[in-house]
Image (cartoon, grey):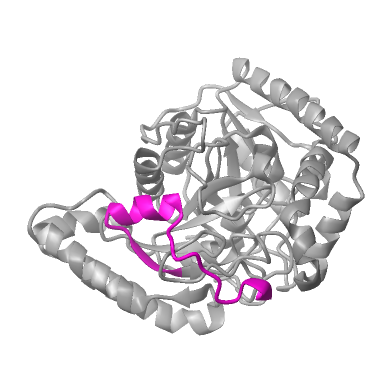
Amino acid sequence: MRGEPFHSARGAFATGADTPRAYLERRLQRLEAVEPTLRAFVTLDVAGARRAADAATERYRRGAPLSPVDGMPLGIKDVIETAELPTQMGSARFAGWSLQRDAACVAALRSGGAIVLGKTVTTELALGNAGPTTNPHDAARTPGGSSSGSAAAVAADIVPAALGTQEMGSLIRPASFCGVLGFKPSFGALHQGGIHGVAPSQSHLGVLASELQDLAAVCTRIGEQAGGDAGFPAPSFDVATVKPERIGLLRTEAWARMDPDARDAFQRLADQLRAREIETPFAGALDVWAAICCWELRWPLAQYRDALGADTRRFLAMGEAMTRADYESALSKRAVLRTAYQALSGECDVVLLPAALGPAPRGLAGTGSRDFNAFSSGFGVPAITLPLLEAGGLPLGVQLMGFADEDARLLGHAAWLLARASCTCR
């Protein structure tokens, strides 16, 4: 399920053999064909996208594209503000809500000529209560969450890339289930102004894409124009293929809970890569990440209590049952865990671990386990899902984790692994 990479199409734009408008129209044909079942988008701006594509076409005709993302159609997760379209956050409370402004990342992309096709489905407030989006490989299965619509829209070839967010597993997991690339940069690497996350110390902006070059181009544009969060300079996202000489294998406590076929497929890959198992003190880490998120989401969720679905209320109840001492203890434990993880940089170049317990589960009420996804959020390090495996005929992602602020290095290792392995789900 692989469409036309945008970076390849740009060469034809330059010669006039293709145009951004024609490229967009092919994507709109795909949208028309699959969206009634896929339900990846909350709102669309087809007329605005066509106007932006026409403007990009004229710039390429003049030999003056604005940036490497000029003319690229994008999906924007519906917790990220856009000026023309409402930001409804999967919540009835925010139906039609808008501050009529672009988030910093959207403004950066638009200034480079990128095209906002529409807002993609998110779980309620990027937490619980799944939306209507289906998995493009099997409509009876979840696409994952909370960046559900963004992952599905990329996997279904509607857009070459889409923006998502992650506080626990909201980029890594849907990328695995849908069979696309999902990149969560280092904490603070990309500006989150105008993004409505609920756990600030673990919130990340990231990108889902079908090709690494397109993913890197989106990150680079945001980093160059908007920078990172306050106090965090944006790192480089340049992709230069780098073979990792030392690959660490991180099983975690979730290994025993994996689908057997998925576990076998992952282990075969780890053996081929000669990954060396890491002995780590990370037991109980998932509870630490969850405690921090639940405490931090009390504001503003407590003020939305009456409008929340059951899943989201459950997270709020967990946070309200905590004390300040519980939160401070979780922060202290996180600091210890982060120090222990960073120490691994002396033992390995990159860390390999599953991206999910198995392929996408049946049903749309849930979005799957966060067990393998939350580590990179808690550590604040860059991570990427690569669609390299399958189990039961469905996509199964492989996760690579790097070290803080070494995003370009991680992308280089990902490029090496993508070139080395064949993607059986495509």
Examine the image and state in which quarter residue 246 appears. Answer: top right
* Image vertical order of residue 342 relative to residue 306, above or below: above
Left or right, 98 with respect to 12, comes to right
Q: Where residue 408 sits: x, y (%)? A: 43, 32
Left or right, 352 with respect to 5, comes to right
- Measuring 53% from the left and 48% from the top, which residue is drawn there? 205
Left or right, 257 with respect to 368, comes to right
Task: Name the residue furthest left.
Answer: 62
Task: Name the residue furthest top.
Answer: 346
Mark yes or no: residue 389 visible: no
Which stretch did the figure color magenta? 92-118
Q: Where residue 360 sits: x, y (%)? A: 67, 63
Q: Where residue 302 sits: x, y (%)? A: 79, 59
Examine the image and state in which quarter residue 159 appears. Answer: bottom left
- Measuring 44% from the left and 34% from the top, which residue is drawn there? 234
- Measuring 31% from the left and 78% from the top, which residue is drawn there? 47
Front position in the image: 288 or 3: 288
Front position in the image: 387 or 390: 387
Q: Find out whether residue 111 is within the magenta segment.
A: yes
Examine the image and state in which quarter residue 276 appears. Answer: top right
Q: Find out whether residue 366 is within the magenta segment.
A: no
Mark yes or no: residue 237 visible: yes
Front position in the image: 381 or 330: 330
